[in-house]
Amino acid sequence: MKPAFRDLAPDGPRVILRIDGHDMAMRDGANLAAEMLAAGIMPFRQTPVSGAPRGPFCMMGACFDCLVEIEGTTRQACLMEVTAGLDITLPKGRRDA
Amino acid sequence: MHEAELIILGAGPAGMAAAARAAGFGLSVLLLDEQPRPGGQIWREVGRAGPLRGDLLGRDYTDGARHVDRLDHPGISHLGGASVWQVDPAGEVAFTRNGAAQVARGRRILLANGALERPMPLPGWTLPGVMTAGAAQILLKASGIVAERAVLVGAGPLIYLVAAQMVRAGTPPLALVETQTLGDVLRAARHLPRALAGMGYLLKGLGLLRELRRAGVARFTGATSIAIEGTGRAEAVTFTTGNGPQRIACDTVLLHHGVVPNTQASRSMDLPHEWDDAQRSFRPVVDAWGRSAEPCVFIAGDGAGIAGAKAATLTGQLSALAIAHDLGALPEADRDLAARPLRAKLALETAARPFLDRAYPPCAQALAPADETIICRCEEVTAGTIRHQAALGCLGPNQTKSFCRAGMGPCQGRYCGLTVTELLSACHGRPQQATGAYRIRAPLKPVTLGELANLAES
Ligand SMILES: Cc1cc2nc3c(=O)[nH]c(=O)nc-3n(C[C@H](O)[C@@H](O)[C@H](O)COP(=O)(O)OP(=O)(O)OC[C@H]3O[C@@H](n4cnc5c(N)ncnc54)[C@H](O)[C@@H]3O)c2cc1C
Ligand code: FES
C-alpha cells in the first residue's frame, strides 16, 4: 500500500538503520516516528492486551502508542531521532501469547 | 546533580518567556524539556523548520523564533531530551536524559508543561491511521510530512489552522467533519461584545475559513454518530448530518475537540485542582502570579488553564517576576510595576476565550461514548465497563482504576482520565469536582532500572 504520508522535502543525508531485520535509509537526525510513517510503516506495534494494531496517535510523548523496541528497551519513537545503526523491533502480540 | 535557582519544566511559550525574564533579573535557570529543541507545541522545532517551511506554517509560528533566540543567555541552561518523571515540591526534579536518570535541585519550580488534546473516544479511534490533529501538525512542523488523504473530525479553531496549513502544503484534507452546530455559534454570540477586544483571533479564524473555502475543502457541521471504519487500519469516517448518513473513504483521520491542561505533574504533588465548567476540564489552583498551594511551586501557560500561546508568554513572565521577588532579586514595588503591562495584555489575550469555548464545545458523543467504545487506549477498557463499575458502586476514577485497570497503562490516564470522570459524574448525577480525578504518582514517565542504576552511581 502507498504510504499515507507525503514527504515535502525528501532530500538530505540519510543513514541506515534496521527495522525488524530490514535495512532502511532514513534522514539523519529526523524524528524517528515521522520517518517511519513516511516510509509507510504501519502499524508500529500490536498491543500487549488484545494484540490490536496501533500507530502513533499524539506525536508528543503522551499516548505511548508509538512504542518500539530498541536494543531490548521499549522507547517512544516520537521522542527519538534517527541515528545510524539503530536496531528496531516492532512489538508484536499479546503479553500472554 | 544540577543546581539552579529556578527549574522550569517545559520549554514552550510559557517556559521560554519565564526563563528569559528570570535570567534578566540575574537568576540561574535550568530549563528542562523532553523535546530535543525548545518551542513547545505551537513553536515546535521553529529554529530548524521556520526557515524551511515558515511560509506554510504562518507568522504565528515563525514568531516563536525570537523567543527561542532569547534563551541564548549565560544564566539559562536548556536541557533538551530531558523527560521529567518526578517533581518534589521541596525543589528536587528527577528526569531521564540520554538513557540516564539525573536529579536537579532548585529553590523554585515552575511547571510550564502545557496542554494535551482532549481525549476523543469514538468508535474506531484506536485504529492505526487515527491521530490527533495536533499530531498531524507536529509532523508537518517538525518533519515536513503531511497526510495525503485525511479527514479532520471534531471542533475548534485548531482544526481550521491545521487544515489551512495542509492546503498551503499542497495537500488539502478531503473534508472537515465538524461537531459544533449553528446553535452553538448563536448561543456563543452573547460573548461577542467582550470578544471584540480580542478581535485579532476572530479575524484570523475568518481568514482561515476563507482559505479553506477557496481551496474547495468540504465542510460538514453538526455531525453526530461519528465512527471510524477499517480492518487493521482507518479506511473511512462515517457520520450523520441534517442531510442524512455520510461516508468518506480516507487513509488518515485527525481528531480534535480542544485542548486541556496537562495536570500530570501538578497532580503528582497532590496540589488542589478545580473543575472549570466552561473549558470542561480540571486545572490546578494558582494565584495571580501562578503560585500554587505549595509556595515554591508555580504553574504558568496552558498547564494552568487554556488561554493560548501569547497568554502563556505573559503568565510565564508573571511567575518569573514573583519568583525573582521571592529570591530577593526584585523589590516588591518593581515587581508590581513590571506586572501591570503584562496583566493588561493578558486581559486582551483572554477576551475571545469565552466566545471560542462556547462556539466550539467538546463533541457530545465523545464526552458520553457508547458502551462498546474503548475509552482507555492502553488497557482497552470500554465505556460500558466504567458504567458497569459505576452501577456496582464505584464513585470515583481511583476506584474504577483498581477494578478494571483503566488509567493503569503507560499513558497513566492522560487520554482517559477526563472521560472516566465525565462518565462517573453522569452515572451518579454528581458534579465532576466531587467525582475527582486519577491520583497520579511518580514516575510520570516510565523509568527503567538501567536508567536508575546510573542515578545510584552518580
Ligand atoms: C499538539 C498541540 C498543538 C498545538 N498547536 C497550536 C498552534 O498551532 N497554535 C496555537 O495557537 N496553539 C496551539 N496549541 C495550543 C498550545 O497549548 C499553545 O497555546 C501553547 O503551546 C501553550 O504554551 P505552553 O508554554 O503553555 O505549553 P507547550 O507549548 O505545550 O509546552 C510545554 C512543554 O512541556 C514539555 N513537557 C511536558 N511534560 C513534560 C515532561 N514530563 N518532561 C519534560 N518535558 C515535558 C513539552 O514537551 C512541551 O515542549 C497546540 C496544543 C497542542 C497540544
Ligand atoms: S505518538 Fe503518542 S507517545 Fe509517541
Image (cartoon, rainbow, N blue to C red):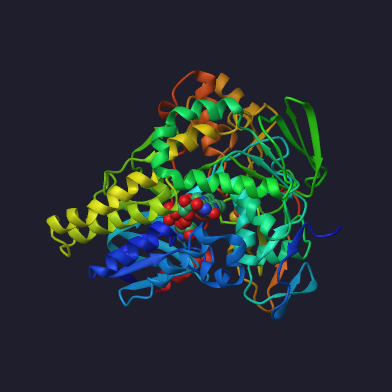
Choose between B410 and B305: the one closer to the eye.
B305
* Picture layout, residue B130 above or below residue B327: above
Q: To which quarter of the image does residue B351 belong?
A: top left
Residue B290 seen by the camera: no
Query: For this rendering, which residue is in front, B30 or B270?
Result: B30
Q: Please determine whether, in this image, residue B174 is positioned above or below residue B457.
A: above
Q: Residue at x 66, y 70 (%)?
A: A71
Quadrant in which ligand 2 is drawn: bottom right
Using the image as rendered, state which of residue A58 and residue B21 is in the foreground.
B21
Quadrant in the picture for the N terminus of chain B? bottom left
In the image, taking residue B324 as reference, residue B188 lies left or right, namely right
- Residue drawn at point x = 56 percent, y = 56 percent: A61
- Residue B98 coordinates in the image, percent (x, y): 52, 72
- Closer to the camera, A8 or B243? B243
Q: Is residue B451 left or right of residue B457?
A: right
Q: Position of residue B362 (x, y in %)?
A: 56, 34
**What is the tally of numbered marks visible in this picture?**
0
**What's the residue at 79%, 32% (across, down)?**
B246
Q: Position of residue B202 (x, y in %)?
A: 50, 43
Answer with left or right where residue B427 lies relative to residue B277: right
Q: Residue at x 22, y 57 (%)?
A: B338
Visible in this render: residue B145? yes
- Residue B458 percent across, percent down from the top left: 39, 74
